Amino acid sequence: MGQIANRQVIKEQKAASKAERDRKYRRAKAWQMAIYPVGGFGHNAFMFLMGLVSYYAAGIVGLGTVVASLIITGSRVMDAVTDPVMGILLDKTNGRFGKVRPALAIAYVLMAASTLLLFFTNHLVPEGLKLVYFIVLYFVFIIGYALSQISLNIGNAVITNDPEQRPLFGGLTMIYTMIFYTGASVYLSLYLTGKYGGYTNVELFQEMTISTVIIAGIAYTLAIIGIASKDRSENYGTGQKTEAIKLKEIWPLFKSNRPLQMYVIAASIDKLSLQIAGNQIVNVMLFGIVIGNYSLLGTTNAIGMIPNILVLVFGIRYSMRFGSKKGFVIATWACIISYSLLLLLLWLGDPTQIRMDNMGFMTISFMVLYLVGGAVRYVGSGLMMPMLADVIDYSAYKSNYYAPGLISSVYAFIDKGVSSLQQTFVGIMLAFIGFRTAFPDVDTPYSGKIFWMTMFLASGVMLLAWIISLIAMKFYELDKDRMAEIQEELEARRQAAQI
């Protein structure tokens, strides 16, 4: 009887706590939390596809490795310049269908149309027009990609303002991301490369494009459905109509917002390192050349999905209890430890012994460190989204301007300016060790230069970035208690505006 009574008391306490949080915050329903993050599935699908564009541009279109890398970098820099303009436009948008839904629909159309034209026709146009044609289509793509990124970030801030729900939302997003990249890696490394014999067959890129357009279309549709009831003016900031921020006010806004500054430093440098380490060329070098078994990439990701999700769930539950900032710091320390050990293992051991049919010390150690490192990396990346939502609300709290599009675009501007260096950085580093006309492929012979360049690109860059992120978090004030204070004040202003 005592146990039954205790259970009833706990149940009543949880119900009372939920009712109190429903009163204080604009919480999302369970089904909204479940399907809106699926929009990231579509966003990641296009990003994964365009991760192959260097192979297509250099090997199929014939633009050359350095030229292709420089074009991609230049296009992304231009994309970063246009981000604040699009952010301001989205902040001014408040029509019948809200802000997020129209932007997601337009973003999908732009990305689908540009990728279909790019991979199906670029190699067919006259030689003198191939370069211009590639630049134009790639620029159309990045406009759509920027719209997608900014509108998804706005949705993250709008769908819930509960400091406990936001880490959960970020966790669900990363679980979907993990599932996508696991499936995409298996699809690419085990199916497409086997079917078409590598990245020299244009049909590989075309089949990947068709699959991406279909998957992304479904994902964006679900996201639009999930955000529909929340995408209204009363859920924007304080619920008041405020004067839109102008372009000339961007720098003062950024200069006076220390949490935004620290977030941008941590998030952008973290993303740059992850993009370099996750570059398809770097994956080919690590698994295809250093380890000597490219199919192991898909196998490892498939095996790791369940433990990765378990670690992610644990990390998000910790963050829900102690806040996004603390969760991010703990995850970053775990990343530093696991990837340092992984680098030492590959240096001091024999990577060619890593085989699924040879479950010795090297294979088991590699699998444990690679999977644990990947899992805690997902925890840190997953917390970037709720932290950006916190920064958006902090900005509204400090200035009474609700500018989620502008805040997202300020971050995107700096983030893309930094991360746009990714492909050029990889291209220049590989050209430095002799790969000037073609990137390393699975058939490239192993050498000491390739090994150390792989270690630098796959681990070293990330370790440096994580150290910088930890320093930035020392000056980031938005922990769980601080966000609770901010949300209470914003709700008080929202209630006052309705009187």
Image: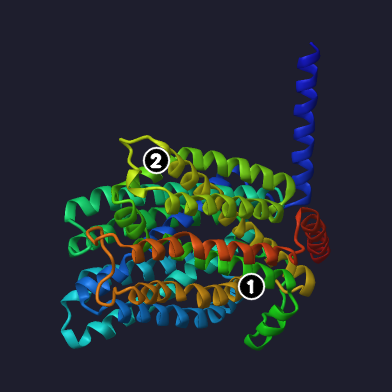
Where residue 363 is drawn, which disc sits there?
Answer: 2
Q: Residues within 10 Å of mark 2 (few under 14, many from 20)?
A: some
Looking at the image, which residue is at 79% across and 61% down? 486
x%, y% of residue 280? Answer: 35, 61
Looking at the image, which residue is at 37% across and 61% down? 451
x%, y% of residue 490? Answer: 79, 62
102 or 315, nearer to the observer: 315
Q: Is residue 480 left or right of residue 373?
A: right
Looking at the image, which residue is at 75% across and 61% down? 478
109 or 384, nearer to the observer: 384
Question: Which quadrant of the figure has residue 423?
Answer: bottom left
Residue type marked 2:
Thr
What residue does disc 1 label?
407
Q: Is residue 445 left or right of residue 431?
A: left
Q: Residue furthest top?
A: 1
x%, y% of residue 34? Answer: 54, 45
54 or 9, nearer to the observer: 54
Task: Identify the image quadrant of the C terminus.
Answer: bottom right
How far apart are the alpha carbons under marks 2 and 1? 44 Å
x%, y% of residue 353? Answer: 34, 43
